[in-house]
Amino acid sequence: MPDRAQWTDSHCPTARAADIIGDRWSLLIVRDAFDGASRFSQFQRNLGIAKNILTDRLKALVEQGIFEVRSNVQGTRNEYVLTERGMDLFVVITSLRQWGERHAFDDGEPHSTLMDDTTGDPVPGLRLVNARKIDLNPTNTHVEKVMDGSNMDIAHDPIRR
């Protein structure tokens, strides 16, 4: 993961988030943590990831505050526990999952389903709505961009987000 001084696009929250969590392995490690994995061996077994790559990704995720390392109850092994910052990725992972359900499978092709433990129902599709409960999408939103780090000029750009 990049040094914070070397952001892909220093004023764009999407670019910064991608710099921190945007590679495949990091996303899958976080997904597995939401599914209960916490030990190096669990992540490696579940993902089939090489040890050196897993070591690198876990180190970076700890450095970025996504995970913290704790000793297990016996004090014999480390566990990787999602921090509050890491838990905030639940909506991101869920959104990516729901996009995959809609676009990465053929009709009728089986796939895992995220379930609501309270109701036993599948988690409903995420929606972005404003304070008036109106659906938001690229046609009714825009990004106010910082044009230059030295001044705070703002540009409206409905295309590039």
Image: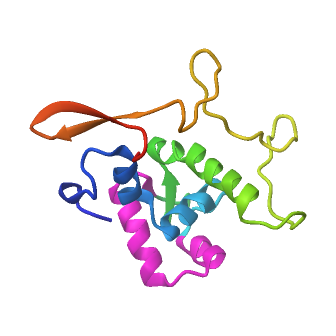
Does residue 110 appear left or right of residue 44 in this picture? right
Residue 159 image point, x, y percent: 43, 45
Residue 16 image point, x, y percent: 34, 51
Picture quadrant where residue 120 is located: top right
Picture quadrant where residue 38 is located: bottom right
Residue 49 image point, x, y percent: 55, 80
Q: Residue furthest left?
A: 150
Does residue 2 appear left or right of residue 55 in this picture? left
Q: Main secondary structure of the magenta part?
A: helix
Q: Does the magenta segment cover residue 103? A: no
152 vs 65: above or below = above
Image quarter (top left, top right, bottom left or bottom right) of the C terminus: top left
Q: Does the magenta segment cover residue 45? A: yes
76 vs 123: above or below = below
**Residue extent of the magenta highlight:** 40-69
Residue drawn at (78%, 66%) of the image: 105
